[in-house]
Amino acid sequence: MDVICLGILVADIFASPIDSIPASGHLKLTDQFLLNVGGCAANTAANLRRLGQNVKVLGKIGEDLFGDFVLKELERLGVDVSSVRRSQKHPTASTFILNVRGEDRRYIHCIGSNADLTFADVDCSMLDGAHALYVGGYLAMPGFGSHDLTQLFREAKRRSLTTVLDVVIPAGDPLSPEQVRSMLAHTDVFLPNDDEAFALTGQKEPIAQADFLAGLNPDCAIVITQGSRGALVKRGGEVIHANTFKVNSIDESGAGDAFAAGFLTGLLEGWSLEYTLRFHECFRFRGGCRFC
């Protein structure tokens, strides 16, 4: 196994773009709805498979139709789902994505079964023989806290795995510097976007965000994505910025997870940091569109 992807698993429902949000009590037509497997762990695992990596995913789904769909879709894509667990208390996590032309997408999310995932659900023997461990959606899994992450990453480092952390920060959730420090203590690569990095650091500029986070763990590569403005990487004294490719962007949901898969591939292949950054930026903007 090349990569273990642990984290949130979601059934995503997309509405194709509309011109405006309907007024209260009004009906607005859309061309189609699309049901797709989503969530950081699932999206990153699926994209890693498209790039030729062997991947196992670990997370929780409910005992429902959405859970059946997520499991079957990941299997169809060639992802190992033998470590996916079923929640007896919650439905499968789901998100409704509303797209309005000319505006950023809006999300309505049910945490569902992702609330049940804890370190007790992890059989650490699954890490044996893997090269990298990716945790996606951290801070959006209420049962998987800093102690769980620390235990998991310690087990991964004991087996010489590269540890990669991606976060989802619900709006308004406060974070202390000590929480951030504990997150990065055993992390080799940290992948926040600039909004998340702002919530973590209080700094507005990506280079200042990267400097702050690198100060908490100088051995961690800090990778800050900035949407259409590209991405910035800081590793030690090296700082690299990559611009984006011009594409017709309709819905960028999952683009950050495609980015993570591309970056992980570069790590596994032993590419230079600059080549890795440009490769995953390219893959991100060719892999994130749902409707074209």
Image: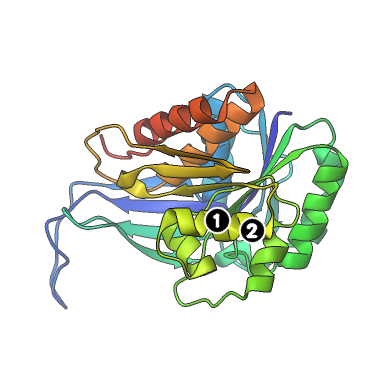
Quadrant in which the N terminus is drawn: top right
Q: Are marks 1 and 2 in contact (CB under 8 Å)?
A: yes
Residue with the mark numbered 2: 215
Residue 116, x across and y down, in percent: 68, 65
Q: Is residue 22 above or below residue 67?
A: below
The circle drawn on residue 211 is 1
Q: From the viewer's perspective, is 26 left or right of 272?
A: left
SS for callout 2: helix
Which residue is painted at 26% across and 57% down in the image?
A: 104
Quarter of the image holding residue 211? bottom right
Q: Residue furthest front?
A: 237
Local crowd size for mark 1, using a 10 Å CA cut-off: few (<14), some (14–19), many (≥20): some
Residue 78 visible at all: no
Q: From the viewer's perspective, is 19 left or right of 79?
A: left
Amino acid type assigned to the residue bearing label 2 in the image: Gly
Which of 282/59 is in front?
Answer: 282
Which of 159/141 is in front?
Answer: 159
Q: Is residue 87 above or below residue 71?
A: below
Which residue is painted at 63% across and 72% down in the image?
A: 177
Residue 274, x across and y down, in percent: 50, 29
SS for callout 1: helix
Which residue is painted at 70% across and 29% down in the image?
A: 2
Amino acid type assigned to the residue bearing label 1 in the image: Asp
Give the number of callouts.
2
- CA gap between label 1 and label 2 equals 6 Å
The circle drawn on residue 190 is none
Which of 189/62 is in front?
Answer: 189
Quadrant in which the C terminus is drawn: top left
Residue 155, x across and y down, in percent: 85, 48
